[in-house]
Amino acid sequence: MSFKTTKEVIEDGDVVILYLNPSNMHPLEIKAKICNKKGKIIDNVFHTVYGGLKVISLIGQKYGSKVELTRGWAYVLQPTPELWTLMLPHRTQIIYSPDISLIIHLMELGPGSTVVETGTGSGSLSHSLIRAIRPSGHLYTFDFHEQRVSIASTEFENHGLNNFVTLKKRDVCSEGFGEELKHKIDAVFLDLPHPWLAVEHATVVLKQKGGKLCFFSPCIEQVQRTCTKLIHKGFIELHTYECLQREMNVQYKSLPILDLECLKYKQVNEDIVQKDGKGKQEEKLLTVTHAHSLPGHTGFITIAVLPPSYARK
């Protein structure tokens, strides 16, 4: 159960990450036998573009080790919420690590925090929330879709996270979060098409000393409508953020001095001025360019504070 604690050696039942390259990683459950599509029990051999791997052979290997495949090699890594976000099976649109880190920061989560999340979806955010609040905190996560709840429940169990999470099938917009959570929650996170419908239910579960509500919406119209509801229900300190990731390429390029005079630095380092094969002078100029593939807009993150009960409207 390698999601639960940091380990050095791979054991039977662990979930590991087989790393081939940055765009080719696979989660593997360490067990000797698996059931194939025809219902037969067979040896657990995982096939990649670089050949096969007998999964049970990883037992006793150290995390981070380089392992041999039949036609190449790979690394075996301990799973983290960030790696899981990159390779999890998508059952819904997920929230990615740049947004997740900002959400956890804005909600001020730490060990011992009690959090409500809705909806669970593919479980990307859930894994990061659990890491932030364990060992003494607890996550209550809700989803209205029965199949998604069943699959996520199995994943939490396989990853050894059952003690830190309670997963329930519920339409929180109409049914709320349940009487058992009344005034027990430090923070509520909403990832719903209509988050304003759950705001009133959130005021019931947040602690009487106050708490925070955060929601994620792809459209600014959803943000506007939900913020109106939050203000009406007594929330204060509303702030909305858009987290955009921009990647840069930094490199030296050889440029003709005479043709690009306007781009030269005021003080040119003589060490980087040289002649090319045809006798022309060139300057190695340090350039910064955007990466070809830039992540686009994912959504708006809004945080609001519910003050202590005496200040609620």
Image: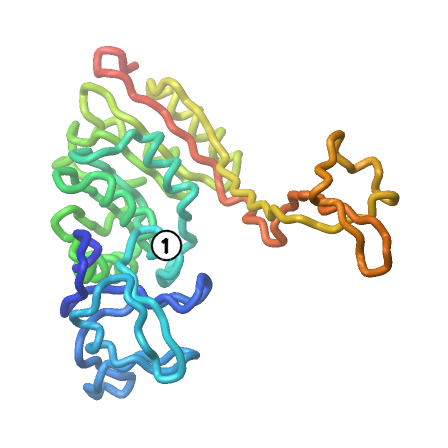
72 versus 181 height, above or below: below
Left or right of 107: which side holds 138? left
Judge whether residue 240 can be spotted in this image: yes
Quadrant where the C terminus sits is top left
Image quarter where the N terminus lies is bottom left
User: x and y percent of residue 281 in the render?
Assistant: 83, 49
Above or below residue 312? Residue 177 is below
Tag count: 1
In front here: 183 or 113?
Answer: 113
Q: Quadrant of residue 289?
A: top right
Q: Is residue 10 above or below residue 182?
A: below
Furthest-top residue in view? Answer: 310
- Visible residue check, residue 146: no
Q: Nearer the viewer, residue 131 or 58?
A: 58
Q: Residue 210, image x and y in percent?
A: 23, 21
Q: For numbered disc 1, what is the local secondary structure?
A: helix
- Crowding at dot 1, Cα within 10 Å, few <14 / some 14-19 / many 20+, comes out as many
Answer with left or right where residue 131 lies relative to residue 190.
left
Q: Residue at x 52, y 42 (%)?
A: 245
Picture quadrant where residue 270 is located: top right
Residue depicted at x 30% and y 73%: 67
Please give the name of the residue rendered at 28% of the width and 34% of the height, measured from the top-left corner: 188
- Name the residue that disc number 1 marks: 85
Q: In the rendering, at what x and y percent does residue 118 appear?
A: 30, 43
Q: Is residue 250 above or below residue 114?
A: below
Residue 54, percent from left and from top: 25, 81
Taking the image as shown, residue 211 lies to the left or right of residue 23, namely left
Q: Amino acid at mark 1?
A: Thr
